[in-house]
Amino acid sequence: MSANLSAIFYLISGVLFILALRGLSSPETSRQGNFFGILGMTIAITVTFLSVGSFSSGLIYVLIFLLIGGLIGAFIAYKIPMTAMPELVAGFHSLVGLSAVLVAISAFLNPEAFNLGSPGSIKLASLIEMSIGAAVGAITFSGSIIAFLKLQGIMSGSPISFRGQHLFNALLLVSIVVLTYLLCSTQSSNFFWILLTVSFLIGFLLIIPIGGADMPVVISMLNSYSGWAAAGIGFTLENSALIITGALVGSSGAILSYIMCKGMNRSFFNVILGGFGAVEQSTSSGEKEYRPVKSGNAEDAAFLMKNASSVIIVPGYGMAVAQAQHALREMVDTLKKNDIKVTYAIHPVAGRMPGHMNVLLAEANVPYDEVFELEEINNDFANADVAFVIGANDVTNPSAKSDPQSPIYGMPVLDVEKCKSVLFVKRSLSPGYAGIDNDLFYKENTLMLFADAKKMTEEITKNL
Amino acid sequence: MEIDPFIFRLSIFILSIFIGYYVVWSVTPSLHTPLMSVTNAISSVIIVGAIIAGLAGNSNSDFTISNFLGFLAISLAAVNIFGGFLVTQRMLQMYKKKKKDK
């Protein structure tokens, strides 16, 4: 296949990838979008095989490795529980990062195969592109591994920081530029290896100071990085499908990070510099006072809801941890049988990744037209009878609106306190991630339900 | 003076960023998780580089390190491609509207 013809096919697959993302603008078109994505990928892979042309003994190995990877991927995709999506996505990001690194190394060792010159005299532009792709890929890889370990609970979710951390990271970033320069001027492979090592280290150091609840930002950010890494390699390989895809994924991740940061009213740099939870906890615990709360049991909750005409459910990460989404749907079904209007309110940063709650509710067969975003539903709280908060905390804290001293002041929150009564399912009175007390616990119209989210929901259903 | 082909690739890159920007803003927030998994899958189109590396210049049967790295990258990217698209498919199948008979 001629180079021009294959370039046209790569362009077609790039366009199909754009359509794949476009399809996600509504759930009806999304499945078709995913099909476009698969089609684009199939075209890209087929064209690559045809353009290499000379089918040698390497081919059989290429196919074997393709098959092995594919089988593992398919197995994971069918087995993974929906609550583990954040871990899965973090793990997948690390694979994109690592394959970018491997392709870059391979191109560096054998530039003839990629038309980039010969070892020791690689074209300058290619060398720069290769370094960028490899460095960003390495950062994506090690950063995603840390994010994965934190989400999986293997590594503590609390921020790890040390003195001079920011200065050290900044120095490492500067050294990447210096190393790229040295690599380009000397063509020495030593600088290439050092560059890779430093990049791996940066990814690691960048993510360890970031706490568990900031994971939505981290995952989106790594999503973005994996795109830029692909684009860097795309420039090296002069492949438009890779360049288009890299740019799409890069901007997609960046937008998601922005949305997540806005949902927390924090700047991107504030999140990246990390250490948020640790600092706030020490200040707030000093002035802690005992305040009475009203606590109730499942019967009380069932009574309140039975007499309501509209209920708004506010799910959070705790629902995912307790795997309570199916029990919740059953409770809602019973409520609906009693002609009670039920809707769901989702805060942008609820859960551990963008859209996490929506997927869990969809898994539990909740129709997506009953699920609303913050801006869509916030005015409805004033007219609702009961707000059922399950596993969420900081995103309902009214002090974000009223108390300028609060660390989350200015963060958009759900106006849960405007409901006639609030049911709050929580295991204990402990503060949420931000380490601050929630005034909502002590409001007169709040009833605390201290229990595991799933058990409590099941109990309530029995009492309805 | 002739324009360096790099400039054309850069143009594709910049314009694609803009396309990405507008397309992603139109994605409904409830589909942000599938968005991440599908972007994950499509960024594994990096497999084309891995295939080139794997098939590179071996008319005889000895493989270079470069080939092996290519093989490894192929299987990593394949995990992502199959895993990413299939898990997206699985998620999207769960998004259903209210039943009409109600």
Image (spheres, coloured by chain):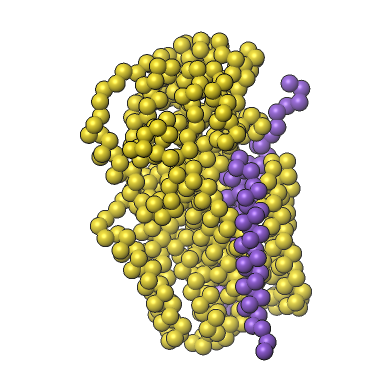
Residue A137 relative to residue B31: left or right: left
- Residue at 44% over, 86% down: A185
Residue A264 relative to residue B96: left or right: left
Where residue A5 appears, as percent x and y from the top left, is: 77, 74
| Residue B32 in view, yes or no | yes
What hue represents chain B? Answer: purple
- Residue at 25% over, 57% down: A163
Seen from this angle, which residue lies furthest left?
Answer: A286
As rendered, which of A70 and A20 lies closer to the eye?
A: A20
Q: Is residue A211 above or below residue A425?
A: below
Q: In this view, does A419 lie above or below B81?
A: above
Of all chains in the rendering, the one displayed in yellow is A
Q: Quadrant of residue A372?
A: top right
Where residue A427 appears, as percent x and y from the top left, is: 38, 26
- Residue at 54% over, 23% down: A382
- Residue at 69% over, 34% down: B96
Q: Is residue A355 above or below residue A70?
A: above
For the N terminus of chain A, the quadrant is bottom right
| Residue A434 in view, yes or no | no
As rendered, which of A250 and A34 lies closer to the eye?
A: A250
Where residue B97 appears, as percent x and y from the top left, is: 70, 32
As rendered, which of A365 and A63 lies closer to the eye?
A: A365
Where residue A143 appears, as percent x and y from the top left, is: 43, 57
For the C terminus of chain A, the quadrant is top right
